Image (tube, rainbow, N blue to C red):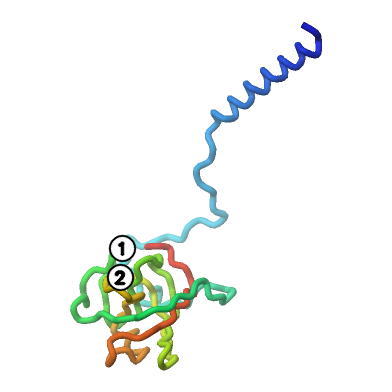
Amino acid sequence: MSICSRFFVDACSALSVGLILVGCASAPRFATRSNPPSPRTESTAETTKSEKTRPPRNPTGKILLTLEGVASYYADDYHGKQTSNGEIFDMNELTAAHRTLPFGTTARVTNLENKKSVVVRINDRGPFKEGRIIDLSLAAAKELDLIRMGTARVRIEVLEWGDGS
């Protein structure tokens, strides 16, 4: 075997062993954060009212997502019962139910018929009636003058994504 052939075989062997060793090394599963997560309360029911109604943390002010559809509202039958994220539903707070938006998401809902708008926080899942895009609390529905008709065509503008809790 010539010197070139021998060198080529040795180089290929070394490369193969190196690739096998690299492939066996564990890869990091999660990225690290530059800032530690903020401390959380034991129960979302313990969240203070000021935390629930804090202004959105979206320094750019850009609308993150826009949706349009029919809104409805829910009140007495669910007042005092547990929502999907574990909170107790208070029909007098500015909250809403959406099928897919993460819990804690802040969104501006605008009634397209009268141009009135309200900012709500997603804390529940729904609506479960076909053709509806969002279920508002009684307080949010009052802000939009939605009570008499029961439903209205609305625009939903996501102002801040929630953390899903």
Q: Which residue is mark 2?
A: 126
**Number of other residues with Cα within 10 Å of mark 2, as a class: few under 14, some 14 to 19, many 20 or more:** some
Q: Measuring from the top left, give residue 10's x and y in whole percent.
A: 71, 15
In this view, which residue lies farthest toward the front?
131
Between circles 1 and 2, the one closer to the viewer is 2
In the shown orientation, is residue 64 left or right of residue 97?
right
Relative depth, front residue between 30 and 115: 115
Label 1: which secondary element: loop
2 is higher (above) or lower (below) than 128 = above
Relative depth, front residue between 54 and 68: 68
Quarter of the N terminus within the rendering: top right
User: Which residue is pictured at 67% across the width and 17% down the height?
Assistant: 13
Say if mark 1 contacts mark 2, CB within 8 Å: no
**Number of other residues with Cα within 10 Å of mark 1, as a class: few under 14, some 14 to 19, many 20 or more:** few
In this view, which residue lies farthest toward the top?
1
In the shown orientation, is residue 17 left or right of residue 87?
right
User: Which residue is pictured at 67% across the width and 23% down the height?
Assistant: 15
Tell me the distance, in whole angstroms, between the alpha carbons under discs 1 and 2. 22 Å
Q: Measuring from the top left, give residue 63's x and y in whole percent.
A: 53, 75
When asked about the image quadrant of residue 118, the answer is bottom left
User: Which residue is pictured at 45% across the width and 75% down the height?
Assistant: 67
Q: Earlier in the sequence, mark 1 or mark 2?
A: 1
Task: Give me the disc on residue 92.
Answer: none
Q: Amino acid at mark 1?
A: Ser
158 is higher (above) or lower (below) than 42 = below
Label 2: which secondary element: loop
Q: Amino acid at mark 2?
A: Gly
Q: Measuring from the top left, give residue 155's x and y in whole percent.
A: 44, 81
Q: How many numbered tags mark residues here?
A: 2
Q: Measuring from the top left, give residue 90's x and y in whole percent.
A: 27, 78
Quarter of the C terminus within the rendering: bottom left
Q: Which residue is mark 1?
A: 43
